[in-house]
Image (cartoon, rainbow, N blue to C red):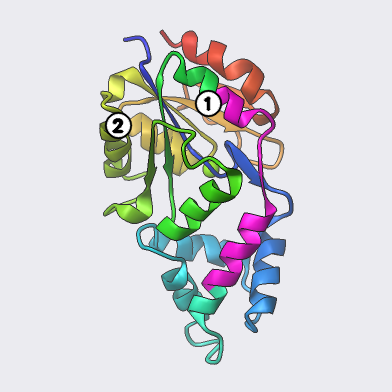
Amino acid sequence: MPPRAVVFDLDYTLAVPDRHRQTLLNEATASAGASDIDRDAYLGAHRENLTGETREPIFADLLADRDADADPAELARAYRRTIADALRPVDGAAGLVRELRERYRVGLLTNGPVRAQRDKLRTLGWENLFDAVVVTGDLDAGKPDGRAFEAALESLDAAAGEAVYVGDEVEADVHGASAAGLRVVQVVSPDGPAPDPAADAHVDRAELVARLPAVIAALD
Ligand SMILES: [Mg+2]
């Protein structure tokens, strides 16, 4: 079935922070008076808290038993501000989405708390860029859970078999979308996950804008 809908991941697919995430985390913990948090520990807590309004539960988990005086809500606010300030769109990303919308319904499915992810879209000026935006904080489950992909498909009025998912992470994006019945284009970069064989195609992030329309058309 020819693709009729395209669903994008946000972080490290269409937008990338201009400094390393560990650096951003250190800046946020320093400004909130908390001790440093390891990026891997953060990712573990993030995976356990993919639904919700803010990152406060993530930081509450991380600060438990070690930073009695640090406030998870303050740290969540500091990290949100730090990331929004550091986030940069992939060159030409907005133009790519507009070009694809001439042929397809185009949505965004992003894992994370509602305020954090909506704040990123506001910072990028992308609040009205897509036909539909689904933030897993609004749902009962995040990627790779099939319910996240179903919500995105429903928002675009598309069936799984006529949709293409574009994302960078192996488990959440490639395996999740593939299991949900979507075709998958994995976005790869020098510092990102290795190309996964479960993806239908791979595109370097540096070539995403130039190559993605043809790669999607070739999935017909
Ligand atoms: Mg991503």
Q: Residue at x 61, y 41 (%)?
A: 15
Q: Report whether 98 appears left or right of 51.
A: right
Which quadrant of the view contains residue 208? Answer: top right
- Quadrant of the snapshot with the N terminus: top left
Whether residue 109 is situated above or below residue 31 in the rendered picture:
above
**In front of the other: label 1 or label 2?**
1
Q: Is mark 2 within 8 Å of ligand 1?
A: no
Q: Position of residue 164 (x, y in %)?
A: 41, 23
Which quadrant of the view contains residue 148? Answer: top left
Q: Which residues are magenta?
A: 76-96
Q: Report whether 157 appears left or right of 121.
A: left
Q: In whole angstroms, how far apart are the C-alphas of marks 1 and 2?
A: 17 Å
* Discs 1, 2 touching: Cβ within 8 Å: no
Q: Position of residue 67 (x, y in %)?
A: 56, 87
Whether residue 151 is situated above or below residue 68 in the rendered picture:
above
Q: Residue at x 32, y 18 (%)?
A: 162
The residue at which mark 1 appears reads as: 97
- Mark 2: few, some, or many residues within 10 Å (few <14, many ≥20)? many
The residue at which mark 2 appears reads as: 153
Q: Report whether 166 appears left or right of 79.
A: left
Q: Is residue 161 magenta?
A: no
* Amino acid type of the residue tagged 2 in the rendering: Leu
Closer to the N terminus: mark 1 or mark 2?
1
Q: Position of residue 215 (x, y in %)?
A: 54, 14
Q: Residue at x 38, y 33 (%)?
A: 177
Q: Is residue 92 magenta?
A: yes
Q: Name the element at disc 1.
A: helix
Give the main secondary structure of the magenta stretch.
helix
Q: Name the element at disc 2.
A: helix
Whether residue 11 is situated above or below residue 215 in the rendered picture:
below
